[in-house]
Amino acid sequence: MKRKIVSSSLVLLCVVFYCPAKLWAGRIEPSNFRYSAILNEKIKKGAFYRVILPGAILEGCERFGHDIRIFDKENREIPFVVLDNRIPPKKTNRYALEVLSYDDQATRTKIVLKRPNPITPVNRMEIDSPDRDFNKAVTVSGSSDLKNWKTLARESIYDFSSRVNLRKMYLQLGNNTYPYFQLIIDEEKEKGIFQNIKLKFNGMDFSASMYTKKKLKVSRFVVLDDTEGHEKVIYDEFKLLPSVLTDPTKRVTEIEFNSVLPFSALEFAIDHPYYCRPVRLYGTATGRKKDSVLIKQDSLYSFPISNQEQTKKHIDIPMAQGYRSYRVVIENDVNPPLKIEAITLRWAQKQLFFIGLDDHQEYRLFWGSPTVEEGNYDIAKMIRADNWFNQPTLSIQISPIAQNPGYRPFKGKDDKSLIEKNILVIVIILVVIVVAFFLFQLWKKTA
C-alpha cells in the first residue's frame, strides 16, 4: 500500500512540473494571424536577408510590430529582428580654439583664434554662448601665417528662443587645415536686421521689441569635420487629408486624425506666406477627448532672417507613441487661421532581418494578432542598431498582402489561466493523498 501511494505521488509530481512547461509555451500557428504575405525568394541556408516593412503592413500590426512572425512550410517559427533604417553618426573629433587676440570696437569685433595641431581637415565652426535674442553677421577667414587671410564663410548666427525655437550657432567653412582663424562680427548690421523683421511682420503677433543691442558673450570656439557626424535615416511616410476645425472663440485650429503608424514626425502643408504659431500635439488610446495626453509642445513658423527664409512646418516626436487617435491644436491668437492642406506622417523605415535555416524553403510573413507577445530571439543579440549596416544582406520583395481566411485568435492568456486552475486541482489532490497516507500510518499504529 505504501509503495502504491508513493508511486502515485511521483506521477502527480511529474504532471505538476512537466505540464506547465509544455503547455505554457503556447504554440503559435499561422492561423492565429489576420494577415500574411509570401517572401518572394528561395531561401538559402545561412544567408542573411533583409525585408522592408511598408506602411500597409505596419497599419495591420499591433504595438509597433510586436506581433510579426515568420513561418516556413512546416509552420516552424523563424527567428528575426526588426530595426530602424538609421546609421548612427561616426565619432567626430572636436578641436577647441585658443584666443590669440580680441579687438572690440563699436562697429565690429575681431577675434583671432589658433587651432592646435591642424592635421586633419575641418569644415565647421561652432560657437558657444549663453546669450539669447541676437542676430550677428559673421565673417570667418583662415590663414597659415597670420598675414594672408582667405575668406571661408560669411554667415549669420542668431537666437530667437524667447519667442520661437530657433537658434543657429555654427558656420560652414569648407574643408581646410588652417592653423589660424579670424572672426569679424559686424555690430552695425544687427539693428537694421531686427527693424526689417518688425516691419515685415507688422500686424502679426510677432515682435522683436524685446531686443536690445549688445555685444555677444562667447564662452568657446570649436572646429570639427561633420561630414559623417550626423545620423543617416531613411524615412517612410503617409499623407493624410484630415478634418480641420477652427474655433474663433478659443482662437485655435484643431486637427484630428487616427493612425497606428509608428510616426516620429508630423509635417504640415501650409499655404501661408509667413506665420509664427504655438502648436500642441495630443494623443488618446480611447478616442475620447477627455482622455487626451499632451505629447509635444512646439512652434510652426515661416519668416525671413538675414535674407534667408526660415521655415519650420513639422513637429518632431522623441519616440513613437502607442496611441490610436491624435489631435493637433494650433494657437492663432488674433491672426487669421492657417490653411492646412494636408498632414504627412513620417517614421524611420522598418527593416526585418533573418537568417535562412534551410535551403529552398518558402517563408511566409504573418501579422495582426492582438494577444501574441513580442518575439524574443537570439538574433537580436547579434544583429543590432549599431552594426546591421556592416552585414552584407540579400533583399527580399513581399507579395501582395492577403487576409487569412482561417484566422483564429490566439488564446494564449486563456490557456494559461486554465492551466493554472488545473495545477491547483492537482496540488489539492496531491495534498489529500499525502494526508491520507499519514492518517493511514497513524491508524495502523493505534490499531
Image (cartoon, grey):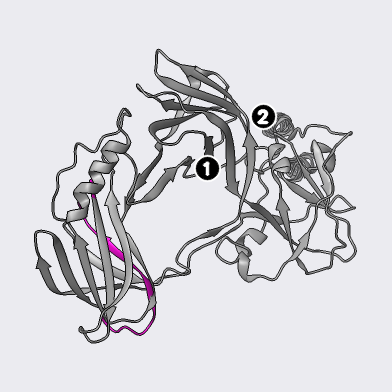
In screen coordinates, is 171 left or right of 296? left
What quarter of the picture does the C terminus occupy? top right
Residue type, label 2 = Thr
Question: Quick one: label 2 or label 1, which is nearer the N terminus?
Answer: 1
Q: Position of residue 256 (x, y in %)?
A: 55, 25
Figure quadrant of residue 249: top left
Residue, disc 2: 446
Q: Position of residue 176 (x, y in %)?
A: 37, 79
As helix, strand or loop, the secondary structure at mark 1 comes to strand
Q: Residue furthest bottom?
A: 145
Figure quadrant of residue 433: top right
Residue 125 drawn in magenta: yes
Residue, disc 1: 265
Disc 2 from disc 1: Cα separation? 82 Å
Residue at 60% x, 27% y: name it: 242
Residue numbers of the magenta segment: 116-134
149 or 390, nearer to the observer: 149
> With respect to residue 393, does 423 lie above or below?
above
Residue type, label 1 = Ala
Q: Position of residue 6 (x, y in %)?
A: 75, 43
Whether residue 107 is visible, yes or no, is yes
Residue mark closest to the camera, 2 vs 1: 1
Q: Position of residue 157 (x, y in %)?
A: 29, 56
445 or 271, nearer to the observer: 271
**Mark 2 Cα within 10 Å, few/some/many (few <14, many 20+)?**
few
> With respect to residue 126, does 93 lie above or below?
below
Figure quadrant of residue 215: bottom left
> With respect to residue 404, does 349 lie above or below?
below
Residue at 80% x, 35% y: name it: 34
As helix, strand or loop, the secondary structure at mark 2 comes to helix
Residue at 24% x, 67% y: name it: 221
